[in-house]
Amino acid sequence: MRLTELSTAFIEQILGKWRRRAIVGVIALICVIAALIEGVSAARLALEPMLGPAGAHAAIAGVFVAIIVIALIVLALAERKPAAERARANDESDRRSERTELIAEAIDLGYTLAQSLREKPRAPRRKRRAPADAETSTDDETRAATE
């Protein structure tokens, strides 16, 4: 199987899944609309004896207006929340960016230091002399006696 065939099969699989979901979604939407129409008709018939024909229509229209207002409020609140989350995400990405810059600068300084140490010729190391015994007054006396 070639690489192009693999990608084609993968895309077809994804499109097939989304196509099935879209078909089921459309069928569900049609059923919801039909149920809503029947429910509104039943509610209007139930309200007509108490409120009259005009009152039943007004009550049902009021329910729909209330649903629309609630939906708009929920939508407005849902849009505010992502804005706050985006601001927090931007702050966090700024902190990450600063950390990344610091790490990059530290790497650059380390590399520069290593290059400068490599370029400078090192002076040969001098051998350290063993510490001489401390001269005491007895050494002075020995020297004076030998002279």
Image (cartoon, rainbow, N blue to C red):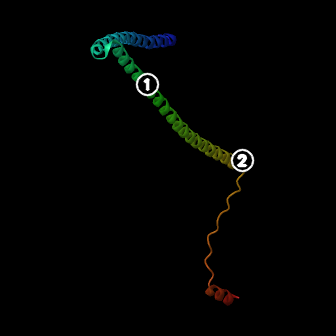
x%, y% of residue 27?
Answer: 36, 9
Q: Which one is nearer the viewer's eye here, 72 or 132?
A: 72
Q: Nearer the viewer, residue 50 or 143?
A: 50
| Drawn side of residue 65 relative to residue 102, left or right | left
Quarter the C terminus occupies:
bottom right
Whole-percent x, y for residue 33 in the image: 37, 11
Task: Identify the element where label 1 is drawn.
Answer: helix
The residue depicted at 66 percent of the width and 86 percent of the height is: 140
The three-letter amino acid code for the residue at tag 2 is Glu
Indicate left or right for 38 with 108 as reference.
Answer: left
Circles 1 and 2, Cβ within 8 Å, touching? The answer is: no
Query: Which secondary structure, mark 2?
Result: helix
Q: Sort mark 2 into few (<14), some (14-19) or many (20+) by Cα contacts within 10 Å.
A: few
- At horizontal 51% and vertical 13% (from top left) the residue drawn is 3
Q: Which residue is mark 2?
A: 119
Q: Position of residue 142 (x, y in %)?
A: 64, 87
Which callout, 1 or 2, points to the residue nearer the camera?
1
Q: Nearer the viewer, residue 18 or 142?
A: 18
User: Which label is found at residue 69?
Assistant: 1
Label of residue 92 in the image:
none
Looking at the image, residue 142 lies above or below residue 74: below
Instruction: Specify the quadrant of the image occupied by residue 70.
Output: top left
Q: Marks 1/2: CA distance?
A: 74 Å
Task: Name the image quarter holding residue 74.
Answer: top left
Q: Amino acid at mark 1?
A: Val
40 or 4, nearer to the observer: 40
Q: Quick one: label 1 or label 2, which is nearer the N terminus?
A: 1
Label 1 Cα neighbours within 10 Å, binned few <14 / some 14-19 / many ≥20:
few
Q: Is residue 72 left or right of residue 97?
A: left
Provide residue 81's location: percent of width, then percent of height.
47, 33
